[in-house]
Image (cartoon, grey):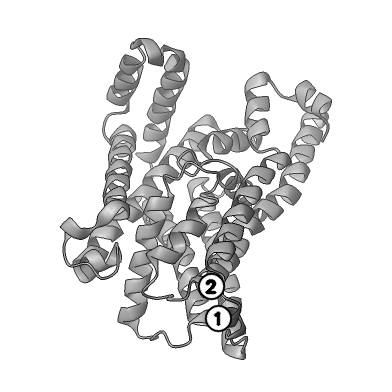
Amino acid sequence: MDKDTIKEEFNEEQQEVLNSIRISRIIVPVLIGILAVGYMLWRKFDPQEFSNINWTSHTLFWILTSVAIIVIRHLAYATRLRILSKKEFSWRKCIELIFIWEFSSAVSPTSVGGSAVAFFVLAQEKLSTAKTATIVLYTIVLDSIFFISTLPILYLFFGTQMIRPNIEDVGDLGGWGFYFIFAYGLMATYCAFFYYGLFISPRQIKRVLVGFTRLGFLRRFREKAIALGDDMIIASKELKKQNWAFHLGAFFSTAIAWSCRFLLLNCLIIAFIPSIPLDFWTQAELYARLETMFVIIAFSPTPGGAGFVEVLFGGFLKDYVTSPTIATVISTIWRLLTYYSYLLAGAIVIPNWIRTIINERRKS
């Protein structure tokens, strides 16, 4: 789709959002990822260890299981979108929109995410303002609730081993451990903020947001603060109308989607480390470590955590994957399946989606 057509059909604010998901944006995260993998291979690659990898039916089975889990994860996100939209979107449309949503997250710093894109995309689909605000803001709450509720439970079972291997108490956590505590606290804080705004007092939250913009360096965010406050008020009214089945369905689909994200990596590790025990306790502890790792990645400054993930992976799981070479292989396949696949899918889906939206506009 050419730039002149986009300028003609969309206003400046919409063009800014479209610019954030332009296909050329994939260049930066891909380059960062390639450089990170190249660095890891240069520093730690051992040809002998690589040649010792047995590409057996066992390996193939667990890689294919990982692919199946990706499909389940995508369908779980699509199910959540269908629930939150009150079935206004077809299954096909939900699947398509999740591709766009995931692509926007992949080309944005993980600490920013794709909320602005989600608002824009849902608005183009002629969804009501109330449902659009509900979907985007409630999604933030649902994702956060999953982490802040499951991590303490996992900690009760696995203690500090879920944060770093071979440590006995919190005092020995080290840099990454304390970064995890900081990230978890930050996640809990904004979850509480949005939960309070959606379910308790959205007007009070709006007053707080607008009040902050009276500070000199925050004045330029005043309009956005007012818009966010208004969206919370609208979404709050919509959410309070829903029954328990709506909330339960939304949370369970969220839990399945996030669980699949980590179980996928469990499967890849099993694929390349045949000696790892398959008992529930061992795999649950590995799952806990992976969920902890993601909380740290969630506040990465790079698009989709590119580079950050590749470097973090080997050290974080060194008691499970002792070979740096195999760790690099696993992390590369993991990123190809879960990150670069969405970059590719987005590069295909988004131009077609924009073309369809413009054609529908011209017909109406």
Percent across and percent down for residue 185 are: 27, 44
Give the residue type at disc 2. Thr
Q: Is residue 45 left or right of residue 297?
A: right
The residue singled out by tag 1 in the image is: 49
Q: Nearer the viewer, residue 92 or 254?
A: 254
Seen at 31% across and 23% down, the residue is: 203
Where the C terminus falls, by quadrant?
top right
Are there few (<14), some (14-19), or many (20+) residues within 10 Å of tag 2? Answer: many
Q: Is residue 284 left or right of residue 335?
A: left
Q: Nearer the viewer, residue 318 or 212?
A: 318
The residue singled out by tag 2 in the image is: 325
Q: Is residue 360 left or right of residue 298?
A: right
Are there few (<14), some (14-19), or many (20+) residues within 10 Å of tag 1? Answer: few
- With respect to residue 210, does 78 lie above or below? below
Give the residue type at disc 1. Glu
Q: Nearer the viewer, residue 249 or 67?
A: 67
Percent across and percent down for residue 359 are: 81, 35
Give residue 241's mark.
none
Where the N terminus falls, by quadrant?
top right
Say what secondary structure mark 1 lies in: helix
Say what secondary structure mark 2 lies in: helix
Seen at 40% across and 68% down, the residue is: 317
Seen at 22% across and 67% down, the residue is: 167
